Structures are given as structure tokens and as C-alpha cells.
Amino acid sequence: MADSRCLADLADNLACRSRLGLTKVAGSRGEMEQLMEAVMPTAPTPRLSSLAQVRQWMGECSRCSLSQGRNKIVFGSGPEDARIMFIGEGPGEQEDRQGLPFVGPAGKLLDAMLAAVGLRREQVYIANIVKCRPPHNRDPQADEVAACRPFLEAQVKVIAPQAICTLGRPAAQSLLASDAPMGRLRGRWSLALGVPVLPTYHPAYLLRTPEAKALAYADLKALVKGPTT
Ligand code: URA
């Protein structure tokens, strides 16, 4: 059973790489970075040692079309030395207005989920894979995620969290370069950007699907415990 799951994950990962135009499996982090640069040419990432520097580097960003419809960039919030980082998909209406992540109804549920496992929002860092609101809250598109990726990576590098929890399918699939469905991704540790990653359901999904809350609770308990392997 575990073997067939591994094979299915491997197949998803290879299919995803092939869509990106990658023709070989990277054997090292440096090789992976070279391959990513080949498919997503960007200016080289400067060496940044604080979130303030990352925010400054981002500036009044217009690298993708999401900038045209946004009110505020939602960079992220939380302490620079947070042990746990949460990554959602992108700002909604309230977040776009306030410039802060997860402040709408999904954010209220996220706060309650954090409290249920003994965490407070002030202890964790919260960001999104895209920092500007997608129109009508649609999923972020690949080019938008790619344009924002260097900033997310720079945030992860500065914070160096002990664990990342992705919220929802777009964040999990994007960070893990996987096409696997949430049912297969959630609750299972992987590694991305050198950090253990545990995907769980998005709080907005849980508002619509309360019966999935128990699984999300189990995921957050596992998150707080940390990776076991
Ligand atoms: N949903 C997200 O994915 N991110 C937010 O910041 C708010 C809602």
C-alpha cells in the first residue's frame, strides 16, 4: 500500500516536471535551482537577511497582472523567528483591503484551529503563495505563482521555520511541485525549500465542509509535534 502510494506520488511529480519542460530529475539542490531558472527566468535573487529587506525588494510589485486589481500587497505577518510558517493560496477581499493575511472568515477559523493546538497567531508566520488578490478569489495561475515565488522563497529563507503547513490545494501543490489531490497530500510530511512541509485543508474549505475539521485538527496536532521521520 505504502509502495503504491510512493509510486503514485513519483508519477505525479514526474508528470508535473514534464509539464514544466524538465527532462531529468534533479540530483541536488543546486541542480534543481538551475533547472527552475531555465524554465522561470528571473533576475537573480539578492542575498536578503531580513523580512524588511525582502519586502523592500518586492516594492510596489507589478511583476504579474494581479497587481492591476489589488488594493494592498499582502506580504505576510508574524515574527521573523517563527518556528512554524503557514502558507495559504492568496489574499481574499478582506485581506486585500487590510494588507494582512487571513483576516476574513477563513482567518477567524484559522485562529480557532491554532488555539485548538495551543498556538497563537502571534507565534506563527502566515503568508500566501501569491501576495495580491486573484480576481473573484479564483485560484492563482501558474505565471502568477511563479512571479511571486522568489519572494516566498526569500521569506522562507529568512524565517527558516522548523515546519511549514500549507493551507489548501493550490499552496500544497505549488510548494511541493505535485499534482496529487489534497486527499493524498494532507497529513503527510514532505520536504520543500529544505523545510519539512505538512499540507492540510484550507480553512475556507473547512467552513464549507465541517466534517473535514477532524482531519485538519489531526494535521495540526502532527504539525506541532513535528516531523517524526
Ligand atoms: N485565503 C488565503 O489563502 N489566504 C488569505 O490570506 C486569506 C484567505
Image (spheres, rainbow, N blue to C red):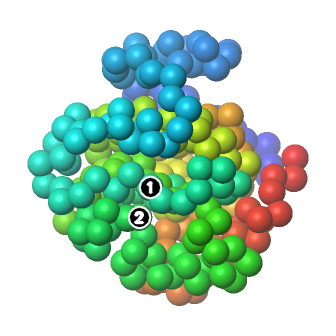
Q: Is mark 2 within 8 Å of ligand 1?
A: yes
Q: Is residue 216 left or right of residue 95?
A: right
Give percent across and percent down for residue 199. Answer: 61, 57
Give percent across and percent down for residue 158. Answer: 58, 38
Give percent across and percent down for residue 21. Answer: 40, 19
Give percent across and percent down for residue 47. Answer: 51, 22
The CA distance from mark 2 to mark 1 is 6 Å
User: Residue 101, which numbered label?
Assistant: 2
Q: Is residue 30 left or right of residue 42?
A: right
For disc 1, the neighbor class at 10 Å (few under 14, some 14 to 19, many from 20) is many
Quadrant of the rendered structure where residue 37 is?
Answer: top left
* Callout 1: SS: loop
The reply to whether residue 146 is visible in this rendering is no
Instruction: Tell me what residue is drawn at x 79 percent, y 43 percent.
Output: 3
Number of numbered discs = 2
Location of mark 1 (residue): 76
User: Residue 165, which numbered label?
Assistant: none
Quadrant of the rendered structure where residue 12 is?
Answer: top right
Instruction: Tell me what residue is drawn at x 69 percent, y 61 percent.
Output: 187
Kindly check if marks 2 and 1 are in contact, taking CB atoms under 8 A apart as contact: yes
Q: Which tag, 2 or 1, sits closer to the chain's start?
A: 1
**Amino acid on which the number 1 mark rests in the picture:** Gly
**Amino acid on which the number 2 mark rests in the picture:** Pro
Name the residue at the bottom extreme. 210
The reply to whether residue 50 is visible in this rendering is yes
Instruction: Tell me what residue is drawn at x 13 percent, y 55 percent.
Output: 69
Q: Is residue 27 left or right of residue 41?
A: right
